[in-house]
């Protein structure tokens, strides 16, 4: 579904690399999390998949087709994109925000209406109740749900997500994460998500790719990374949620 082969990104003509010689494959219906500290290259990697950034070297295939052979706008309209800032159009209603990409794809009004109704229902915001509201009338969690609905509105099989839940309070964050995971499974979506939260990556993703200084250090299932970290940095980053879990058990033990 998505394949990167020897992909690199340099902003200074090859003197340094934001992303260095990165290769991985994401299968249909798989959820891959890219994780690492700020500046490690994970967001640049994500943006190269839909040509918001152009690779300096290497090849990226989407559905077996080289993205360089595709018109960037057409490519992006067929790939959902969700990011932390949400980016809703403030002067458009919820329904108008969700309908934006289907309209660009020249869907007829009946099809757009039906899709808006379907997808808003899936994210827990029924069209008849929320369709006419504006972003300013929604909570942060509701806005994020609209952002997810907009990304899925054009029936995209691929969704890219850049820190999509980071701005939400902890309770809302878990609710929206669980809702999205349910939708991802139901629609068999292929997802690549950037996050700096290892717990989030382990809970949501089928596989996790750990990056540092532009390099992909290890990629594997949550259990593979937890049980067999192959780099000191990977061990350090997967130990954090374990230490928190151990600390919680210790606290609970004191109160028994």
Image: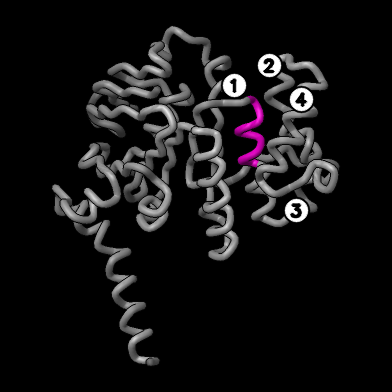
Q: Residue at x 40, y 11 (%)?
A: 65
Q: Position of residue 238 (x, y in %)?
A: 26, 57
> What is the CA distance from the residue labelled 3 to the residue labelled 2?
27 Å
Question: Is tag 1's residue or tag 3's residue first in the polypeptide sequence?
Answer: 1
> What is the CA distance from the residue labelled 3 to the residue labelled 4?
22 Å
Left or right: residue 188 compared with residue 36: right
Q: Position of residue 142 (x, y in %)?
A: 69, 52
**Residue beneath disc 1:** 77
- Image marks 2 and 4: residues in contact by CB distance under 8 Å: no
Secondary element at tag 4: helix
Q: Residues within 10 Å of mark 3 (few under 14, many from 20)?
A: some
Task: Tell me where the magenta segment starts and ends, as one range.
Answer: 147-154
Secondary element at tag 1: helix
Q: Position of residue 152 (x, y in %)?
A: 61, 32
Label ID, residue 138: 3
The picture quadrant where one finds residue 20 is top left
Secondary element at tag 3: loop
In the rendered image, the vertical position of residue 49 relative to residue 82, given as above or below: above
Left or right: residue 72 compared with residue 127: left
């Amino acid at each position: 579904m998505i394949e990167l082969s020897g992909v690199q990104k340099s902003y200074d003509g090859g003197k340094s690399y934001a992303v260095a010689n990165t290769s991985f494959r994401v299968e249909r219906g798989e959820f891959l999390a890219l994780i690492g500290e700020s500046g490690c290259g994970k967001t640049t990697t994500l943006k190269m998949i839909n040509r918001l950034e152009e690779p300096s070297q290497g090849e990226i295939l989407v559905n077996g087709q080289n993205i360089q052979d595709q018109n960037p706008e057409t490519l992006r309209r067929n790939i959902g994109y969700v990011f932390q800032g949400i980016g809703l159009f403030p002067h458009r209603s919820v329904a108008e925000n969700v309908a934006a990409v289907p309209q660009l794809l020249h869907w007829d009004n009946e099809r757009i209406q039906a899709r808006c109704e379907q997808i808003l229902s899936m994210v827990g915001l029924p069209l008849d109740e929320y369709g006419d509201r504006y972003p300013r009338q929604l909570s942060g969690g509701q806005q994020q749900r609209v952002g997810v609905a907009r990304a899925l509105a054009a029936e995209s099989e691929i969704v890219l997500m850049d820190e999509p839940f980071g701005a939400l309070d902890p309770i809302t964050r878990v609710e929206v994460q669980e809702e999205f995971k349910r939708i991802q499974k139901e629609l068999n979506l292929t997802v690549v998500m950037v996050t700096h939260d290892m717990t989030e990556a382990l809970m949501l993703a089928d596989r996790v790719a750990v990056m540092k200084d532009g390099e992909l250090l290890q990629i594997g299932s949550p259990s593979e990374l937890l049980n067999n970290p192959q780099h000191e940095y990977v061990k350090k980053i997967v130990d954090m949620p374990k230490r928190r879990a151990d600390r919680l058990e210790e606290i609970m033990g004191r109160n028994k």
